[in-house]
Amino acid sequence: MFFCEISRCFRSFYRYTLAFLLFCLSSLTSNANEQQAEIQQLLADYDLAGIVWTTFDDGQKNSSFSGFANIKSNRRMQLDTKVQVGSVGKVVLAVGVLHLITTGKIHLNDSVEDLLPTLDWQNHWSNNAPITIEHLLAHTSGLDNIKMWQLLNSSTKPDTPLAEAFLNTDPHILTPRFEPGTQYSYSNMGYSLLGMIIQAVTRKDYEDYMDSLLEKLNMNDSTFNFVTQGSDSRLAMGYFEGTNPQIAVPMLLRPAGQFTTTVNDMSQFIQFLLGNGMSDNERIVQAALMNRLGVPKGTFAFESGLEHGHGLALAKRDRHGAIGYCHPGETFGFYANLCLFPEEKKGYFFAINTDNESALYDDFNRTLINQLNVRKATENYEAGSFNNPQQDISGLYILSPNNMLEFHWLDYMFNSIYLTATESGFKVYSLQQEEFEITTVGKFLYRRDGRINTSHVYYHDGQFAFISDGLNTYKKSSLSFLLLNWFVLILGCFALIVLIARGAVVSVRGFKKGINPILLPFSVLCLLAIPVYLYSQQSFLDFGEQTAASISLAVVSAGFPFACLIAALLYAKEKKLKSFDALITLIALMLALYLTVNDVLPIIFWK
């Protein structure tokens, strides 16, 4: 009897256990199906070709795919499909640099100027604040992000020496725009310099050094060498705006964005990043350095109490109720993102082979965060009343610095923000995004709507006032001066429209009453049709080179101020300065001189 009871109990236990396991398996399958369906829907909504993704949850890997790797050949994405991930490769490159530090070849505080002495450094702070390896890794060097001729340059070859990216005629290309170490400002140039440092230290091409390291990380399907769809049939085709194909192109700043990988390799990389710097019982990166991958340090914003920012490889981000350490990436025809949640040993990666400006790629982040069931962050402050001088903080703030020096004027005009005080903090207004509110949560610390932790900090460096979110820093400026700039721009644009209309009317009527000087600037504006046509006939990859299109644009745009000046002098000679046409010409001259002073005219992208 006893054995019969034991047998019945065992059978019952077996049935319940089996039912429970089947239920769990069904739930997992259901969740996987839901994830697949949601991601497929996002692909359709945003007209994206295909995607590969992986999630890592405390040792459990789950990789999948959807859509097309090549639309024309009807080839679908697979787990072994290769993708290009742009700046996500910076994280892998950073690990390579940290490995050199771990093995004693270099140190975080080594001067980059000493390691690369042949470059023309123009660091005005070199005596007290030389640019270090840490500054390059954390994007706090002060160097500009990228030049148009470095980005769009079809003359670049896969083996073009890295130093050629810094041998341009621009003498200020290696001039920091702020004291190194004090602010964050994303720099592709900085990571290209890291590639040069690897070569200087190892005495081999950085691609070969990094590919050897990839083998140690068990990422055998990844490479830093140049790969095209023609040389590797497993590489997905890139696309612009839906179905416009774009093959891989070599990059001048290739250490900053040239990396080809697979979703399985990136899953392996996530596992390494969530570990303690070991791979197959070999120490790759010191544990102390691994702990700093996403932890900012040293900047004014960090020292003022803001914990969010960029560490040695990743940026700390507060999104969708979760605090993660992430790095997005874009390259021709691809978009990717890598995110880690170290406390829970979770992470994800995805790569999409379509660059679509209208796509909300953040929806994929939200989906994967929810599917991973990442623990929602808790507030790290106690709400209360803080005696901050709100009226002193209110006002206009301009990017300091903006991301690319050659677009400084555009960012000043269109990317500045304005703060107005509210009962609980400030309203933030901008031409580029919807208004939002930041709430006071501490002394000069603020939290943006939709965020969990502190997102902004206000600080003063002794000379200027700043507000920063850790990744964008704005300096307080004069609102009246910005409004004056807008007045000049609007008035000048109105004058251009009238000038074109008057020039067309005068041209149609002929020259019975003599030649009207307004025809001179009008003719120059008409000549803009030449570079417009020439640009339409060339590849966008030639945009940063000296071509017939770019040279003609530079010549015509440089000639416009002179045409306006000569026309104004002719009106003065004829004593017609009070005429309507003369007034329009003078206003157009004012706009031309204004744009010239702000380095907008002549329009040159190869310098």
Image: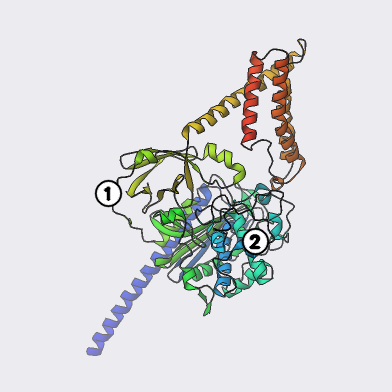
Residue 499 falls in image quadrant: top right
Which is more toward the observer, 120 or 538? Answer: 120
Seen in the picture, residue 189 relative to 395 is either above or below; the reply is below
Mark 2 = which residue?
235
Q: The N terminus lies in which quarter of the figure?
A: bottom left
The residue at 73%/59% (across/down) is 160
- Does label 2 or label 1 sit earlier along the sequence? 2
Residue 352 in the figure: left or right of residue 30: right
- Callout 1: 10 Å neighbours few (<14), some, many (20+)? few
Residue 249 visible to the viewer: no
- Secondary element under disc 2, as helix, strand or loop, is loop
Q: How is the image coloured?
A: rainbow
Residue 231: percent from left, percent from top = 71, 62
Query: Which mark, residue 302?
Result: none
Residue 264 in the figure: left or right of residue 149: left
Mark 1 = which residue?
384
- Callout 2: 10 Å neighbours few (<14), some, many (20+)? many
Question: Label 2 vs label 1: CA separation?
Answer: 54 Å
Q: Amino acid at mark 1?
A: Gly
